[in-house]
Amino acid sequence: MFLHLKNITKRYPGVVALSDVSLDVIEGEVHALVGENGAGKSTLIKTCTGAVTPNEGTIVVQGQEFASLTPKSSEQLGIAVIYQEFNLVDELSVAENVFLGRAIRKGIVIDKKAMQEQAAEIFRQFDITIDPCELVANLTIGYQQLVEIAKAVSQNARMLIMDEPSAPLTQAEAEALYAMVDKLKASGVTILYISHRMDEIFRLSDRVTVMRDGQKVKTMDTGDTNLDDLVRLMVGRELTETYPARKHCISDEVLLNVENLSGNGLHDINLQIRKGEVLGLAGLIGAGRTELAELLFGVHPKTGGRVVLNGNDIHPKIPKDAIACGIALVPEDRKKQGALLEIDIRGNISMAILERISRFFTVNEKEEQRIADYYKDAIRIKTPTLRQKIKNLSGGNQQKVIIAKWLATEPTLVIFDEPTRGIDVGAKSEIYALVNSLVESGKAVLIISSEMEEVMGMSDRILVLHEGRITGELERKDFCQETIMGFASRT
Amino acid sequence: METTASSKNTGNVVAAIAKRFGIYIVLLVLVIFFSIASENFFVGSNLLNVARQVSMLGIAAVGFAFVLLLGGIDLSVGSVITLVNIVTAWLMVNSGWNPVLAVFVALSISAAIGFANGWIIANIQMPSIIVTLAMMIIIEGVAYLICKGLPIYGFPKSFAVIGQGYLGPIPIPVIIMIAVMALGMFILNKTYFGRYFYAVGGNEEAAKLSGINVKNVKYLVYTLSGFFAGVAGIVILSRTNSGQVLSGKGFEFDVLTACVLGGVSVAGGHGKISNVLAGVLILGVLSNGLVLLDISQFVQMVIKGTVLMLAVAVDCLQHRKPS
């Protein structure tokens, strides 16, 4: 047994990230860790690396017991993590990166030659062809990752934690990664492998642990389970949150018709949204959901295909064009893309309609105030005054202000990208009710969410994306988490 | 409980006042200090003198403040002043043009230079500091080429009105400055594009996603910066009555100092013209007062640099997030 986590609990204010999780990782095995976004995998990893101090439980590494680890003690115990963002310096050579912070020296001079030789030796062990003198900046992401792994190996890592290592890789790069994992295992390194890709879990791992909602569901021998079981264990819960019912209001009229749309990492997207319909986009992170929203909204140019809105071909080059066509986008990252934090609530609500309410370049502030007042009441923005800066509001209220900004443009199609991320339950259900009232008034809604329950609870129809393509479509009566996960993780 | 609450409130009020009028309090302290230190300072004619001395700075500072609001910088301001100086002088003297026409052409050129800055910054996405540095060098060279480094003088008499005339007791340059500042305040507070300056400077991505044509905003802001620098150049030319290649040398740093003293954030998104005026006046009062006290130019430099450092330090400390 290399690592033994005993009854680990980690609480954050209002959330239990890990609840009484116990996990054994046997020395020399490849142990896969799977679960939906938010299942607690990241917190668990951070517990092992010392980035998180658990509230309860013990961590046993090779017989030594700890209440918690620090980044330093974790490193000394031989635990290393390969994150998705690499800790490499682009402008240094591969060899210098491998020995970063512990450069081999001759006196006060760095001994480049020795570092190159030793790096080359490590690469030889793993049958990798990388020139140690090459700059890291010139390597593909796949090779950069191998350098990152080599760096960990050269630090005598006994256990490697790999957090979705294959996510940014092409198929060929992933093959190189798998080969490296096999060799690492053969050389006795223990590996904890987190992934959303089911195929590689079956290919690489000896055992697999499923997590859900901060708890461990089960640990199994990979050979004793199959894809269906695994997916069922990952998502296997009833919808617990209630989604307000809405009248059936889908008209026969098609509002948006997208034909063979390509660009921004997407290929051959075909979809239709009817007036009064909520279309959900499901898929894993990086599948192209946000990218599709950005294409429709003119953030990135399309490279092919047609977008027809209300019978007219549209070609938005910048968001301003898309807004003029009647499209609104409530973006994914509220603080970075949505709110203008230093501007007051009124100014945020009016930002997208300022030109419409201006005469001779001058903003009609009475009209501005009237519109802001209207939406403050209509969607219950809780604030003593509209002249308050938006940064002083809670997340839920900030989101409402951003939604108000878009409703003020009187759109016909509203795209919500992660509409309830980081928002409390009360504000969530208000936003769901708002979506209902939008479609009931004849608008169309496109909703993107990483929360499976949310997409299923809110949508009339769901499209599933995988690697920039639509891989599945489900009508409401056919909604099923296992099916969606199957489409989303198919290879 | 109530007394603590009210005393806390009073403390908050004082802090709020200090935060809101801080820069004017500094100005007031300086004025009081020099009034006591020199009997010639707080005299009507001297105060008007201060106002006239800073007017060119104040005019150029409005456009510069817009650029800073956007999170950029415009180092070409001084060179634009020089070029406008030389072009206007050359057109009036060597081509015998009517002053009005010469001024019109020169201001158009200054606006066009600003637009070119904005176009390159927005479309090629070069850092503004590099674009405007290159532009600064280019147009200074052009100014030298036009006049071969020699001063140009002998303007029509009417031209002197702009820099040397009075309306009642008020010098014309001061009136121009007040008009430009009023225009700047109007743009920032009342027009939609003024709002866009704050939005783009505060968060360019969110601004773009809110339907703002960010490129157009950049064109406009840099064009205005060039234009207002041009206006300042005309006033300088009229005051000195001769076109000189050194007329705008280093001016951009005085303007930057005034704006930063006036609380305009170099990171973009923050700043008010009314406070920029205070920054401009502080520089003017310091220059004038220190001269009256017969303090050497080099000591003045030390003092001005120190004031700038302190003003920004206080601002940074106020805005620093508690860690």
Image (spheres, grey):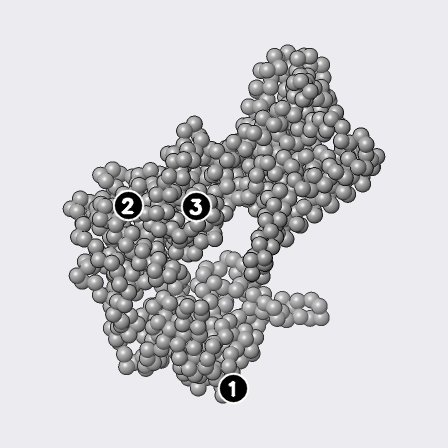
Q: Nearer the viewer, residue B184 or B208?
A: B184
Query: Quarter-wise, where is residue A349 in the image?
Result: top left
Name above or below for residue A58 compared with residue B204: below
Q: Viewer-nearest of labels 2 and 1?
A: 2
The kind of residue tagged 3 is: Leu
Q: Mark 2 to mark 1: distance in Å?
A: 58 Å
Q: Residue A63, position in %: x, y? A: 49, 88
Task: Please give the residue where the numbered disc 2 appears in the rendered image.
Answer: A413
> What residue is drawn where x is 26% and y is 48%?
A438
Q: Mark 2 to mark 3: distance in Å?
A: 27 Å
Q: Is residue A310 left or right of residue B188?
A: left
Q: Label 3 lies in what chain?
A: A
Is any part of residue A163 visible from this angle?
A: no
Query: Quarter-wise, where is residue A161 in the image?
Result: bottom left
Q: Describe the element under mark 1 as helix, strand or loop.
A: strand
Query: Mark 1 packing: few (<14 Cα in 10 Å), some, or many (20+)?
Result: few
The kind of residue tagged 1 is: Gln
Name above or below for residue A224 compared with residue A234: below
Q: Nearer the viewer, residue A306 or A366?
A: A366
Q: Earlier in the sequence, mark 1 or mark 3?
A: 1
Quadrant holding the N terminus of chain A = bottom left
Q: Residue B31, position in %: x, y? A: 73, 37
> What residue is drawn where x is 61% and y is 12%?
B98
Q: Earlier in the sequence, mark 2 or mark 3?
A: 3
Q: Label 1 lies in what chain?
A: A
Task: Please give the residue where the numbered disc 3 appears in the rendered image.
Answer: A386
Q: Mark 1 to mark 3: distance in Å?
A: 57 Å
Q: Are marks 1 and 3 in contact (CB under 8 Å)?
A: no
